[in-house]
Image: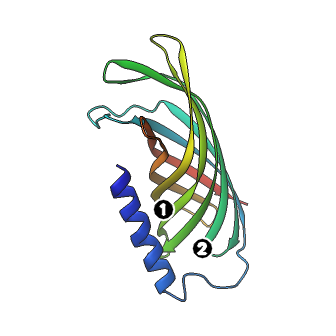
Amino acid sequence: MKKSLLTLLLLTSTTAFASSEVFPTTEPKNNMYLGLQLTHGLHSGDSFEEIEPSMLIARFGYSFATNLAVEARLGTGFSDYNVNGVNNELDNLAGIYGVATIPLSKNFDVYALLGFTSAEIANTNNNHTASLSGASVGAGVNYKMTDRISFNAELINYVDEADSAFGGLSAGVTYKF
């Protein structure tokens, strides 16, 4: 998961910097946004056999250029998910990210994000809680329904420590104001 996300991030970043039209200097309109994502938590050794939303992530962002933003996220789990016979549940998640967006058409764009996440994950089998924190990398797509409302899908590696990796596969909605 880490290599594919890193490759996608590098390709997206390279394409963004190669195009002079991607980073115009004009101030974006509706430069603040809020979003909600339903997320399926992914751990090391997890498979995509069964995808069930287990987390709710709130997104708060500010676009300081047309295709560049800074974003904060807060999340919590609402159900546990099983990884190799172990039930896990996200207690909380907080992070800050830089987001670069590349428009592919009027209503469709791709984005890459890079940042830092801190999360606490509870093992509901033995009531043990693990604290994870570290660099985060991800990529996603946005489909704009209107100038203010868009839907997104995303794959992110929130934390990748030596003995544990934690990420998410998400779908959500964003409102610009």
Residue 144 visible in the snapshot: no
| Residue extending farthest left | 49
Q: Position of residue 45 (x, y in %)?
A: 31, 34
Q: Decide: is 54 above or below 158.
A: above
Q: Which residue is mark 2?
A: 67
Q: Nearer the viewer, residue 89 or 145?
A: 89
Q: Position of residue 10 (x, y in %)?
A: 42, 69
Which amino acid is tagged 2? Asn
- Disc number placed over residue 44 in the picture, else none: none
Q: Nearer the viewer, residue 167 or 173?
A: 167
Residue at x 28% of width, y 36% of height: 47
Which amino acid is tagged 1? Tyr
Task: Indicate the quadrant containing the C terminus: top left, top right, bottom left or bottom right.
Answer: bottom right
| Residue extending farthest bottom | 20
| Residue extending farthest front | 162
Q: Residues within 10 Å of mark 1 (few under 14, many from 20)?
A: some
Residue at x 45% of width, y 42% of height: 168
Q: Which residue is mark 1?
A: 143
Q: Decide: is 124 above or below 17.
A: above
Q: Decide: is 137 above or below 51.
A: below
Q: Nearer the viewer, residue 104 or 159?
A: 159
Residue 146: name its quadrant. bottom right
Q: Position of residue 67 (x, y in %)?
A: 60, 73
Element carrying mark 1: strand
Element carrying mark 2: loop
Tell me, yes or no, whether the two marked residues, 1 and 2, touch with CB atoms within 8 Å: no
Residue 21 visible in the snapshot: yes
Which of the two marks, 1 or 2, is nearer to us in this view? Answer: 2
Q: Residues within 10 Å of mark 2 (few under 14, many from 20)?
A: some
Q: Decide: is 25 above or below 156.
A: below
Residue 30: name its quadrant. bottom right
Question: Please, which colouring scheme is shown?
Answer: rainbow
